[in-house]
Amino acid sequence: MGQISILEAAVADQIAAGEVVERPASVCKELVENSLDAGARTISVDLEEGGVMRLCVTDDGSGMDQEDAVLCFSRHATSKLRRAEDLHAIRSFGFRGEALAAIASVAKVSLTTRRRDDATAQQVTVEGARVTGVREAGAPVGTRVDVRELFFNVPARRKFLKTLRTEAGHVEDALLAVGLCRPDVGVQLRTDGKLVLDLPAVPDAALALDSPARVDRVVRCLGEHLRSSLYPVRGQTDLLTLSGYVVAPIETRRDLQGVHLSVNGRPVTDRQLVQAVRAAFRTLLEVGRQPIVALDVALDPALVDVNVHPRKAEVRFADPRRVSGHLISLLSEFLHTTPWLNRGTHNQTVYRLRGNAGLTVASDEQTSDAPIVGEDPAEAHRARVKAALAAFGQAADRRDVPPSAVAQTALSSSSSPSSTMALPTLESQPGRGGASSFSALRVVGQVGGTYLILEGPDGMVVIDQHAAHERVVFERLRDRRRGQGQPSQALLLPITIELTARERAALDDVTVKAELARAGLDLDGYAHTTAIVRALPPGLDGRKAHAIVRDVLAELSDHGGGSGARTLEERDDAICARLACHAAVRAGDVMAPAQVRALLQDLDTIDLGAHCPHGRPVVRTLDYTELAAWFDRD
Ligand code: ADP
Ligand code: MG
């Protein structure tokens, strides 16, 4: 007798019913989880025609004997639990005992498997749930499950599949999720014979969060462009251990696809956990932006039920509120250390307002790696407050620079060229006659690296530098689109960017291409995951081409490309808003006095409807009456 036993009816009943097989990616997920459960160290996946024609998963795990190789296709066959009580402490990935049965009922499957001690492999073929052959075969130790012609006997299901590229993209996403939470396992994906994903296993000795091999692996999964903004995080409470990586909130996404979560090493898309992560990031992100993280929550398996969802994507915690609460506080604690302000290659000092914790100052003198949750850098930072304030005072003294010299002055007014950024102003369009005249006001300074303080006739004027600049750029982009259309500027050299298979697939859609062209983006899909960017709207930095393209694609896919409730105009505006966000000076960027002047002049030329394209206020005034009231003056 092998290891598999048929589940007792009682256990079977405890298992929520549901469809396991939805598309090639769900087949892949089940097979890969089985491979992980079998202790595989290498898993490779082969796709033909998006996985619909063929999806084959090969592992080097434990393998099965002949009896189990046949039995594993029966419904509720599982080697992973034998008694109902086991349901409360599942450590393995899959235990429902229905994945292989479900897959075999809608495809032609052949399974080849060999245990370490067996001389030969066993091969079992199944078609539409009927075993059609069992024979010995030659094969290495491990298991290969070859799934052909998915939904061959259920044409209705086939209709729901998207393009083959999109399906391949979902498979890739599923493998990337495993890639992130199981760095100890090597993962490969070939589509139509071509190697498109290659994640070598990270050796056990190099699994620490800050080990270069581990970081490389994460970067391969999340994208090379995020390498410099990746921070390891680890924290622990009496309930759970949080570990993984957080991307500095400078890099964000329009959608939630950057939120990669796992529970006890199993990828999940659990809503409560996602909400907890968003809650922790809330004050750090622009409205409508989502964080990018890869985090694992480890807790006592007895406190989590992974059985509730047919595809095991969601989990049920014994005490969901407590889990969310602990996750939020660990993550918030880490985010409040703002490690991204501490690391860098240039000599920049920035201020940041931190909730009601007051003004904290972070400086680049500290080049150490990201702090781990638990350390409190506030103390160290406090010591640098004075120096930082003095530095800003000096910069403010040099504020009377003619605005014509913006770019050059922005660079030369600082000892370090990279510490200030030139504002991409887009040539201004005179004659709009804005109502306000900010450039006439006295600039008092910049606080929190984010807010400009001006002295107005009625009181203190506070401008959110990012929101304001974003508004300026947005107006210009929109004017240009409405005017000449095609507001684009050819890049000196075309830029090649890497996209996910899904993003790349979107470029084959003519409506998407047309929208991109209207926005001033000229790019072509190339090969499986590559695109070549030839032109961007003026004012946008070619070095950000990758982030810009991904963002715009996410904006389009969120709203179903060419369809959806929004008008064409609204969609185009939404894209302009995204572009403006990329072109605008960021919160946290130190602005040279000349840059401040240039921004104020630009603000004068637009009709400032008070809000940035994301609906946040741009300018606020604290009037003298209010100020007087603060100090009990009449
Ligand atoms: P479950 O994973 O829920 O147990 P499955 O239908 O996915 O149910 O798999 C049934 C059984 O087949 C597993 O419990 C396991 O014993 C065996 N099995 C499936 N895939 C593999 C594999 N790649 N290597 C070894 N055993 C496997
Ligand atoms: Mg399984």
Image: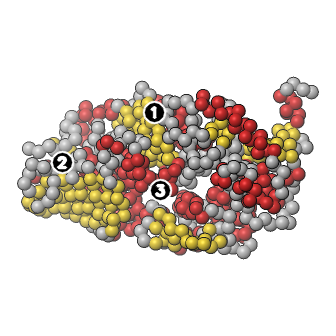
Q: Is residue 41 above or below residue 87?
A: below
For label 3, the crowd category at 10 Å Cα-Cα, with few meaning under 14, some 14 to 19 and many 20 or more, is: few
Q: Are marks 1 and 2 in contact (CB under 8 Å)?
A: no
Q: Secondary structure at mark 2?
A: loop
Residue position for label 3: 224
Mark 2 vs ligand 1: CB under 8 Å?
A: yes
**Residue toward you, 564 or 265:** 265
Counting residues from the start of the chain, the first of labels 3 and 2 encountered is 2
Q: Is residue 340 above or below residue 330?
A: below
User: Which quadrant of the figure contains the C terminus?
Assistant: top right
Q: Quadrant of residue 58?
A: bottom left
Q: Is residue 205 visible?
A: yes
Mark closer to the observer (3, 2): 3
> In the image, residue 586 lies at what x, y percent?
66, 50
- In the rendered image, which residue does mark 1 sit on? 235
Contact, CB < 8 Å: mark 3 with mark 1? no
Give the quadrant of the N terminus: top left
Circle 1 packing at 10 Å, graded few (<14), some (14-19), many (20+), is many
Near mark 2 (Cα within 10 A), the count class, few <14, some 14-19 or many ≥20, is many
Q: Which mark is residue 62?
A: 2
Depth check, front residue: 493 or 434 = 493
Q: Is mark 3 within 8 Å of ligand 1?
A: no
Let me know if residue 74 appears in the view: no
Secondary structure at badge 3 equals: helix
- The residue type indicated by label 2 comes to Ser
Label 1 is placed on what type of residue?
Answer: Gly
